[in-house]
Image: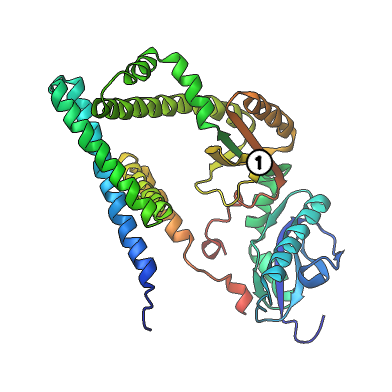
Amino acid sequence: MPIRIDEKNLKKGVLGLVVALVEIITELLEKQAILRIENESLNDEEIERLGEALADLNEALETIKADNNIEDTVESVRCGLDEVVDDVVDKLMNPSRWAKEVEKHDRNRPCEIPLLDS
Amino acid sequence: MTEIDHARYLYLIANTEEEQSLGDIGLGDRPVYTIVFQDIAAVVHASKSEPVPAKSEEQAEQWILNHNYVIDKATENFNTVLPFSFGCLARGDDEAIKRWLQKNYSLYKRELERLKNSAEYSIQIFYDPGVLEKQVLKTIPELEEIDQKMKAMPKGKAYIFKKKFELGLKQAVSDHLASMGREFDKLIKKNATQTIVEEKIPYVPEKYAGKKVMVAFSCLVAKDNAERLGQSLETINKREGFAVRFTGPWAPFNFVDLGNIENDT
């Protein structure tokens, strides 16, 4: 079966994914900056330079999102990634979930009520 | 019923010894009736063996409503029922259904007894992030201090401190919600026999737009406890920044445990 690709949707999807990933990296950089300020490893001039760079990056991302109308796509990618990460962390922290997953999988196996076919 | 009605559409299993008609209330106004084995019965309508797809979305919606109406009506008549999901069709005539009930009798009877005088309720707790942020901000002077200082900072520094403020506030709201969650959980579990946390909420009424979902449960509640549970939820609903949606009673769709039928038969 041929795979149909809508070029507009593909562009939105890929751009949305890239912007979402850059946003996540930016947030990590912001957290690092806050930690460094709290550890007093940055002077006032460095804080100002770092802050301006992060603010400019944030502004650029907002402009890209608005110009390409991908706000919802980015939000959706980020929600999806959040769910995946939550799920992985939850499974790592609670091994009892593995047993439940297996049980759920077994239950969802399609089965017929035997007598009804007789 | 016609010669071609070689299947039975299944609505539920109920506690009754009586063969009876529930009227023309089934999907497409089909006559609904009970097929009894000893003191339990399947509530069905006679159907063709092959599933007939709905002609339109409206018809599909109407059939789903019909399906739930039969379950509600049967719950009124027979008290506890074991409901089937929409669209369960069993091949065979009344005798085949009777043999099936006979084969699984102990399993169905056990579940009917376990769920006797209980019903399923749905609870959704929402919160208003804006209200909670204001409440939390008042209790953390450090955050208020950052908020004040930011106004006098140069652009770059103010940006980083704004992020620090936002992260601090988000964490504080999250801690507040976790603590409220533990309190609400105790209130709900006190009056519920079983609870299941719903991971996804398919429908949120317009009334709650702008609010965020804190938690959603399906609860199995004994009829004697339903009013007390309602009162507990009312106390949560009255708290500033929170709202509760409490619906039911429903047939216990989420709490019927038939294990693996193949192993039990």
Task: Report helix, strand or loop for mark 1.
Answer: helix
Q: Is residue B135 above or below residue B214?
A: above
| Residue at point 58%, 56% (across, down) | B258
> What colouring style does the render use?
rainbow
Q: Give residue B148's quadrant in the image.
A: top left
Tell me where residue A63 appears, x and y as whole percent. Answer: 34, 48
Determine whether, in the image, residue B89 is placed left or right of residue B152: right
Q: Using the image as rendered, state which of residue B131 and residue B87 is in the foreground.
A: B131
The residue beneath circle 1 is B207
Q: Residue at x 67, y 38 (%)?
A: B246
Residue at 27% in and 28% down: B155
Image spot of residue B181 (x, y percent): 51, 29
Front-most of B209 and B23?
Answer: B209
Image coordinates for residue B33, horizontal then vertical, percent: 82, 67
Residue shown at the point (12%, 22%) measured from the top left: A41
Number of numbered discs: 1
Q: Position of residue B108 (x, y in %)?
A: 66, 56
The quarter holding residue A51 reads top left
Query: Which residue is nearer to you in this view: B175 or B240?
Result: B240
Q: Horizontal placement of B238 versus B34: left or right?
A: left
Of the 4 image quadrants, the one containing the N terminus of chain B is bottom right
Quadrant of the image occupied by residue B103:
bottom right
Indicate the chain on which mark 1 is placed.
B
Between B43 and B66, the one nearer to me in the picture: B66
Q: Amino acid at mark 1?
A: Lys
